[in-house]
Image: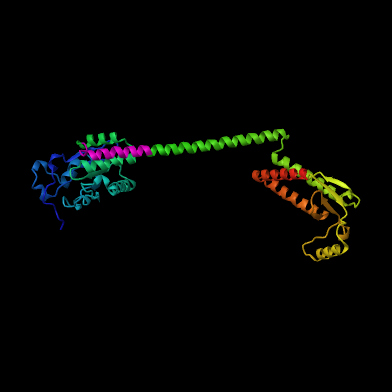
Amino acid sequence: MVRVSRVVPKDWTRYSSIGQVIPRTRFIVFKTPLNDQLATKVPKDRRFNTTDLFRQLSLTGQHLGLVVDLTDTDRYYDKNDITGMCVEYEKINCPGRGFIDRDECMDSFTQAIQNYIDKCDDEEALIGVHCTNGVNRSGYLICRFLIERLGWSSHEALDAFEQARGYPIEKGDYVMALHKAAKNVKNEQQKQQQKQLDSDSDSSDRRRKSKKSKRKYREIEENTGGMSMIDALLGEINQQVTAAAQFENSPASNSEDTQAQPATHWGFAVKRTKYQSLNQAQQQGFRAEEENSPFVEDEAEGEFEDEEYEEVQGDDQIQSASSKRRARRSRMNKMLAVMKRGKYHEIQAMQEEMAISHGNARNI
């Protein structure tokens, strides 16, 4: 058996039973219906129960799809009187004191309304909301929903509620809380707009830099006769590799009598000469060690004793001519691989390394 209240809510008889639909919404607000036992304590002309609720709506051609009960008790009427009429019922206990600080009340109300709207196909079905008198708690939650979900200003929401219900929200702290909520929504919208503007500005900067870079490359292509910067550098490297290969295969590069021959490719002033500073025992030991090594490749020039060496002026380190040629070829192949990848930062680093190498060579 459902427990019922024995006392009629305070000031309940001062308010009209039901208001009008809030314009541009499906909300309709009314005070809580009372069961038959409580109704006997109210004058007949002011009684209001669930039967009266449905009858008054039917007279105006309206019908309910959802009832949201915000009272902090279930003793005023039996919810089966609502669900028995094929109307959904949602209970959200909202205490009278500290109500505006209870964010869970607003979250539950918003979720209940949104769930019903998402699954209800009947756009004519109204959403009935009531607290004890259908003024303060009902007005606050509905107005806040209009502000936060539908983008209304606080003044628009308050005015629309007052005109539809016939009474304004009477508690000043509720009204101030609604103005604060509207301000917070406005500030959040401004932040989102500023983020969008910043994002658009960043995109504009990237597009401007991209256009500038493309224009720079077009100018380079025009100055190089239609060749891109990468093609021009690749052509230069290929010419240098060809020149180095021709020099290595020329008879002059293998001649023992060759005197000072500058290496124009790398900028080193070198002198090619027969290695004479090691004694016979050192030569034999070095030759035996190299012949037994699995990492040494046979050279086209012949035996080890016919090998020529280069001595860099101002440097005490001595390397064989074939080793230097292999090193040069390795560096050139590495540079060609970098150029073919076409990555600008690698090409730039390679050019800086070449400039440093040329500078060091001039200082030798």
Position of residue 209 measured from the top left corner of the image (x, y, whole percent): 58, 36
- The answer to whether one can see residue 303 in this image is no
Q: Residue at x 31, y 35 (%)?
A: 153
Region rendered in magenta: 168-187
Q: Is residue 255 left or right of residue 156?
A: right
Residue 303 vertical position relative to residue 68 in the rendered view, above or below: below
Please indicate, yes or no, whether residue 220 appears anywhere in the rendered image: yes
Q: Is residue 271 left or right of residue 169?
A: right
Describe residue 101's horizontal placement relative to residue 344 as left or right: left
Task: Count up the numbered dots.
Answer: 0
Closer to the camera in the image, 331 or 317:
317
Is 179 magenta? The answer is yes
For the point 51% across and 38% down, the residue is 202
Q: Position of residue 147 (x, y in %)?
A: 31, 39
Q: Position of residue 107 (x, y in %)?
A: 31, 48
| 27 is within the stretch colored magenta | no
Choose between 226 and 99: the one closer to the eye: 99
- State the image quarter where residue 222 is shown: top right
268 or 221: which is nearer to us? Answer: 268
The quadrant of the picture occupied by the C terminus is: top right
Q: Decide: is 252 above or below 300.
A: above
Residue furthest out toward the right: 257
Which colour scheme appears in the figure? rainbow
Determine which quarter of the picture holds residue 117.
Answer: top left
Classify the position of the N terminus by image quarter. bottom left
Expressed as whole percent of the image width and height from the top left, the position of residue 18 reads: 19, 40
The majority secondary structure of the magenta stretch comes to helix
Q: Quadrant of residue 265?
A: top right
Name the residue nearer the viewer: 77 or 293. 293
